[in-house]
Each structure stands twice: as C-alpha cells, then as structure tokens.
C-alpha cells in the first residue's frame, strides 16, 4: 500500500504542478505586502474550493488569513500545511512565499486524493510573515490547538531538512526631552537624542556580557529636525534576537534597564513599545524531520546539508511551540543567489522554481502519508514534542 499510495500522490502532484506554477507566477507578478494580500488570499482559496476543501476566510480576525479543511475517511489526525504569500516592499517575492503557498496547496490536494486514510487535511493561509507575524496571531487565537502536525517548505540556496531560528522581539524606544536653542540656551534643553545615543552606547557595553547567540541591531528612526534645536523627541528601533525565548526575555529586561539609565543620564523620559509581534525560536521536530529527509532522498535528492542553527527569525517558531512542526529548505539556486532580492524573486518563476513546487509538495505529502498510516510513528513524534 505504501509504495502504491506514494506513486498515486506523486502522479497527483505532477498533474497539478503546471497549474500551481502558473499561480506562483501570478503571485510573483502581483506582490502584496503583509496583511494586504487580498488577491493572493482569494486566488489560493479559489484553488482549495476547486478541489473540494471547505474554506473559512478571515480566521483569527485577519482579513487575509484562511483555513481550508477536507476530511478523509472517518476523519482522524489533523495534518496542516502552511501557506505564506506576503511579499517584501519594493523587492516583491524575494523570499519566495509564492512558492511556499503553492507547494503547500500541492501537498494538501495530492494527499486529499489518497485512499485508505482516516484523517483531516488542513491548509492554513498565514499572512504577514515578513512584517507582522500572522502565525503569532493565529497561534494566540488557538487555531493550532487541534492540529497534530504542521509543516511548510521554504525556498533557499541549499537543501536543509533541519534548521532552527532565533527568537525575536522588536522594540521602539521613544525619548522625550525639552527643546531649546542649541547655541543660545542649551542649559534649558533636555536632549532626547542624547538619550538615544546613550541607549546605543549602553547596549554596546552590555554585549560583552551576553551569550554569543544574541543578535542586537537598531536604527535611529527620529533624531531631531534641525541641528540648532535641541531635540525634544528621539526614537530608536531595535531587533533583539537569541537562540531561546527564555534567554531572550532576560536580555530584553537588561535592555529596559539600560534605557532607563540612558534617560536618567540626560534627564529625559523614555517609553518603549513593540512595533512588531514577537517570534519564538523555531524548534523543529527531529523525528518528523527524519521522515521528511527519508522521503526527500527517495525522490533523488542527496545534496542535503547537515542540521544547522539558523540566524534569522520566523513566526513558524511560534507554531513549533504548540504543535510538532518542521520548516525545511529546498534550493532554487546556488549560493550566489541572495535571498530578499529581486534576483531571488525572479528565480521563483524559473524552471527551478517549478521543480521546487513539485518536489516540496511530494515530500510533504509523502511525509504526511507516513505519519497518518503509522500510529506508532505519530505517537513518537508527539512524545518528542512533549519532552521539548
């Protein structure tokens, strides 16, 4: 049954690859930034409805989020394939979310045509990965509470089945002082920009006492209007990252104390707020990743890099904290191809982009089939997840 079922899955993916690739090209030519993916959401749900999925739109209070479901047999474990479809400002689909979305559709559709399974196939439309963390909101709203396994595949310049990502917090610090003539009455002013500069200096001094996996990068987004006026308002934005959420929380508390000290030095007031939702660190399920790799190799892919620690961040991390999940990468170009670039966006609509959709859809569907047809394997995956 295993071999015959996978052959059927493979044929089903082959049958719809051209349709999915055309959709990927349409998404590439009509990029929409996070939480404004109205066309993309509509096009993706149209395909799901065409293949008999029941579609709920606007889930989690997000206009461009959706959930497609299709019951197989008597129903059973719920396997979720995740779509991303937001683009980058100016660059467009330089992160390849048009491929992520279409590959997940392909996996779900092919799996839904498999006989002999008792399960529920779920497709989540997850907006705003680049600029707001749509999955964070969906997780907080409980949309993943009844899901048994979640997966998606990201385009890259290498094949990597198992990689982590960093937890991230995004904070804006606003310093408030008092304006005055910078030459005529400097003693009457309180320089908010100096507060920001002390914040940067304080953070730089703090770095030597932090673990090596911590990453801190910031900008001054507002520093005054004219050099002869002492700024009464200055703003800095920072990303704070760390390998583990628990340690990142400690780091951020230290940063808050630095900000208080910076304000005290100059006599200013300081407030801080998140300007993006936080991402947790990605914790891929090792057993599930091993199943994915076995299927990937069965499809002729052998150039797979060893497990690695990532340095970026993704809201898939939040999903991995509530359900067993994987987030593999498959190559659409060599190392000269730079992610988040127009060249990368163009590569998504190349022949390698088409091959990505076909390969990622097959490998995810094969992996889901293995889990659904082996209760013992599913229990082992869940046990690993519980142990953390």
Image (cartoon, rainbow, N blue to C red):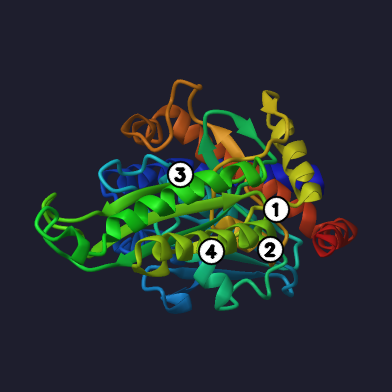
Is the C-beta separation of discs 4 and 1 under 8 Å?
A: no
User: Which mark's residue is nearer the viewer, 2 or 3?
Assistant: 2
Q: Give the residue number, with chain letter if any, for mark 4.
A: 257
Q: Where, by quadrant of the figure, is residue 248 drawn? A: bottom right
Residue nearest the observer in this picture, 48 or 297: 297
Q: Position of residue 29 (x, y in %)?
A: 27, 44
Residue nearest the observer in this picture, 48 or 115: 48
Taking the spot 66% from the left edge, 49% from the top edge, the residue there is: 243
User: Which mark's residue is nearer the viewer, 3 or 4?
Assistant: 4
* Position of the C terminus by quadrant: bottom right
Q: Secondary structure at mark 2?
A: loop
Mark on residue 89? none
Q: Earlier in the sequence, mark 2 or mark 3?
A: 3
Q: Give the residue number, with chain letter if any, for mark 3.
A: 99
Q: Earlier in the sequence, mark 2 or mark 1?
A: 1
Q: Position of residue 242 (x, y in %)?
A: 61, 50
Q: Is residue 304 above or below residue 369?
A: above
């Amino acid at each position: 049954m295993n071999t015959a079922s996978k052959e059927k899955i493979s044929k089903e993916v082959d049958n719809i690859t051209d349709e999915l690739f055309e959709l990927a090209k349409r998404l590439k030519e009509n990029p929409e930034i996070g939480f404004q993916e109205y066309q993309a959401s509509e096009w993706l749900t149209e395909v799901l409805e065409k293949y008999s999925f029941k579609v709920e739109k606007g889930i989690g209070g997000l206009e461009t989020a959706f959930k497609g479901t299709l019951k197989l047999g008597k129903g059973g474990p719920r396997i979720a394939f995740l779509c991303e479809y937001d683009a980058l400002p100016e660059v467009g689909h330089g992160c390849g979310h048009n491929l992520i979305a279409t590959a997940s559709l392909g996996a779900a559709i092919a799996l839904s045509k498999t006989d002999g399974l008792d399960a529920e196939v779920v497709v989540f439309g997850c907006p705003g990965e680049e600029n707001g963390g749509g999955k964070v909101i969906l997780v907080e709203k409980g949309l993943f509470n009844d899901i048994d396994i979640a997966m998606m595949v990201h385009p890259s310049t290498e094949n990597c089945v198992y990689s982590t990502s960093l937890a991230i917090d995004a904070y804006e610090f606003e310093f408030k002082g008092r304006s005055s003539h910078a030459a005529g009455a400097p003693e009457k002013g309180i320089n908010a920009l100096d507060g920001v500069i002390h914040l940067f200096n304080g953070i730089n001094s703090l770095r030597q006492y932090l673990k090596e996996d911590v990453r801190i990068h910031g900008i001054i987004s507002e520093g005054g209007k004219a050099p002869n006026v002492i700024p009464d308002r200055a703003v800095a934005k920072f990303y704070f990252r760390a390998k583990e959420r628990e340690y990142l929380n400690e780091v951020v508390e230290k940063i808050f104390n630095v900000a208080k000290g910076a304000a005290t030095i100059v006599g200013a007031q300081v407030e801080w707020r998140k300007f993006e939702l936080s991402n947790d660190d990605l914790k891929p399920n090792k057993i599930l990743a091993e199943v994915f790799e076995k299927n990937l190799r069965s499809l002729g892919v052998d150039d797979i890099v060893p497990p690695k620690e990532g340095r970026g961040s993704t809201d898939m991390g939040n999903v991995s904290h509530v359900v067993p999940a994987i987030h593999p990468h498959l190559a659409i170009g060599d190392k000269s191809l730079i992610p988040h670039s127009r060249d990368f966006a163009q590569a998504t609509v190349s022949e390698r982009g088409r091959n990505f959709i076909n390969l990622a859809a097959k490998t995810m569907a094969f992996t889901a089939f293995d889990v659904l047809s082996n209760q013992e394997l599913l229990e082992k995956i869940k046990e690993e997840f519980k142990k953390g």
